[in-house]
Image: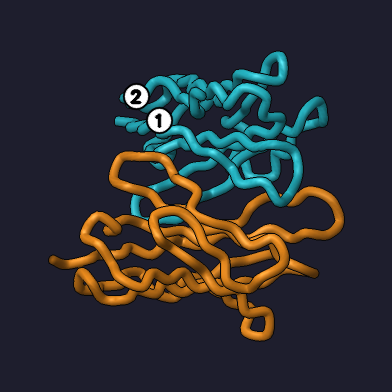
Chain colours: A cyan, B orange
Amino acid sequence: GAGVSQSPSNKVTEKGKDVELRCDPISGHTALYWYRQSLGQGLEFLIYFQGNSAPDKSGLPSDRFSAERTGGSVSTLTIQRTQQEDSAVYLCASSWTGASYEQYFGPGTRLTVT
Amino acid sequence: AQSVAQPEDQVNVAEGNPLTVKCTYSVSGNPYLFWYVQYPNRGLQFLLKYITGDNLVKGSYGFEAEFNKSQTSFHLKKPSALVSDSALYFCAVRGAMGGYSTLTFGKGTMLLVSP
């Protein structure tokens, strides 16, 4: 079956512009996660959605970052007024409900802020 | 709070030799432990996990990992390395108790296998 897909694969934007990153999870997966991976760094948790529960936003670095998940499926991560330090690879993952289930990752969106 | 340490930024091994990528963790209660691999310009791929049961877990591509509760470690191993194993490896942990918690990743270890 299809895996997690993300679009665009690459995004170059000017400082101060808003960007939207999209994630299509594996069909049926109830949990969806966003991570950020900066050059030479590990994965930084941003936000996760679990079914109809309120999302865990504890990892969002500032109020310029927001995310939504429509209909329990597709998710959009929005970064407003982008800064150069926002340049990174943004990874989306999905999984079944339950702590023992592994996450399946998309290929990522490489964001470059100039 | 939960945390993962991967003490080596890079591991170098010759093809055909055994490899070990180290991981130690800290979590309240019993852990769920995972290894992922990331090839260049790709997302992370799941390799294996420890939930319960046998301390030696076997996964994809001939990799295995040994859970050691007393040492709070979950080292990744392979008996004979391949050049194609060269990639970035991440260890991750999540607590098994008290409802859902996020998955915490280590900083990653770059594995370089030379021909």
Percent coordinates x, y for residue A42 in the rendering:
46, 55
Q: Residue furthest bottom?
A: B70
Q: Which residue is mark 2?
A: A11
Between B16 and A102, the one lying in front of the other is: B16
The residue type indicated by label 2 comes to: Lys
Q: Is residue B42 visible?
A: yes
Q: Helix or strand or loop: what does disc 2 sit on?
A: strand
The label on residue A50 is none
Residue A103 in the image, given as x and y percentages of width and height: 59, 42
Q: Which chain does tag 2 point to?
A: A
Q: Earlier in the sequence, mark 2 or mark 1?
A: 2
Left or right of B19: which side holds B77? right
Q: Nearer the viewer, residue A56 or B81?
A: B81
- Please name the residue shown 63% across and 73% down the image: B55
Measuring 41% from the left and 40% from the top, which residue is drawn there?
A: B43
Q: Which residue is mark 1?
A: A109
Asked where in the image residue B77 lies, by quadrant, the reply is bottom left
Residue B1 visible (yes or no): no
Judging depth in this view, the residue of B104 and B59 nearest the camera is: B59
Q: Are marks 2 and 1 in contact (CB under 8 Å)?
A: yes
Same chain for mark 2 and mark 1? The answer is yes
